Amino acid sequence: MARIVGGLTTSHIPAVGNAIAKQLFDDPYWKPFFDGYPKARTWLDAVKPDVAIVIYNDHGLNFFLDKMPTFAVGAAFEYKNDDEGWGIPMLPPFKGDPKLSWHVIDSLVRDEFDICSCQEMTVDHGFTVPMQLLWPDYAASGIRTIPISINTVQHPIPSPARCYKFGRALGRAVESYPEDVKVVIVGTGGLSHQLDGKRAGFINKEFDLMCMDKIVGEPETLAKLSPLELVREAGAQGAEFILWLAMRGALTGKVRKLHSNYHIPISNTGAGMLVLENAA
Ligand code: DHB
Ligand code: FE
């Protein structure tokens, strides 16, 4: 049977794509950010997952305001990267796992999540930057991917509770797959940031650290936040934290924090990352 071996979270700031292209790993601005990732990669090298299910938000590349699914699940053989406007270097396509995708889609719909299935899906920085950080040698890793996009862009966005329950249903879907594959769930985006309006540049360190702490052992507390409370505390784009909660919902074993990192600011964002083990 398929097994969810762990969950990872990371911010997906586009400027990181440029910093990677320029190899700025030891630059004083970037070092405290990049220093968080080698431990995650060492864990991934040891665990060797076969599939990464990447829960991210599309930022206007594949979906726009005219058609905005709340939950969209990739079911393609490959996922092409394109640029929705940040000008970061583009990456080669990412390999899919359509068989597992269709199993997940089937299970989610039977579980009353009426998702949008996507046999074509282009992926933006919300997907690619975390993939670069976690699998810098992606081609050699052999890992297959399933992107899942949750709307954080156009209100009404799904509530933290709904995303947590979505994660629960995703966990049931994966763990009912009869093949022996090891799966990691990645939740991207966050933590606090607001890119526009009167509060542009808003970061809430206290709230971010509280979320990073409680998501390990008390995720239900965070799932009680309303979308409005989340926007108030984390900023308009900090609402991306619902993607972390969806990831956490999928982990139903013994969850243990292995590594974490938090640094502010990276671009306009409180940059956080977590590695959670999901033991049987
Ligand atoms: C930034 C953060 C994001 O999550 C994003 O999607 C775009 C930009 C930033 O901090 O620059
Ligand atoms: Fe974002």
Image (cartoon, grey):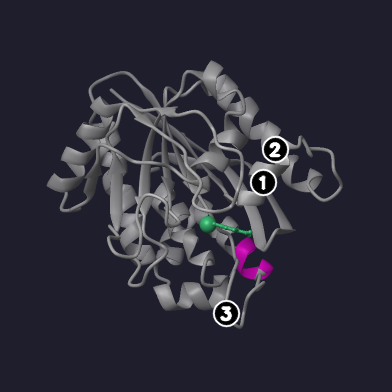
Q: Quadrant of residue 219?
A: bottom left
User: Which quarter shows the N terminus?
Assistant: top left
Residue type at the position of mark 2? Ile
Q: Quadrant of residue 263?
A: bottom right
Image position of 231 with respect to 275: above or below: below
**Mark 3 element type:** loop
Using the numbered discs, state the Cα–Cα distance from disc 1 to disc 3 in whole angstroms: 23 Å
Residues at discs 2 and 1 in contact (Cβ within 8 Å):
yes
Q: CA distance from mark 2 to mark 3?
A: 29 Å
Q: Residue at x 67, y 63 (%)?
A: 268
Q: Is residue 65 visible?
A: yes
Three-letter code, disc 1: Val
Q: What's the magenta bit mostly, secondary-structure-wise?
A: helix
What is the spatial separation of the Cα atoms under label 2 and label 1, in whole angstroms? 6 Å
Tag 2 near tag 3, CB within 8 Å? no
Q: Which mark is residue 20?
A: 2
Per the rendered image, the range of residues in magenta is 205-209
Can you identify the residue that label 3 sits on? Answer: 197
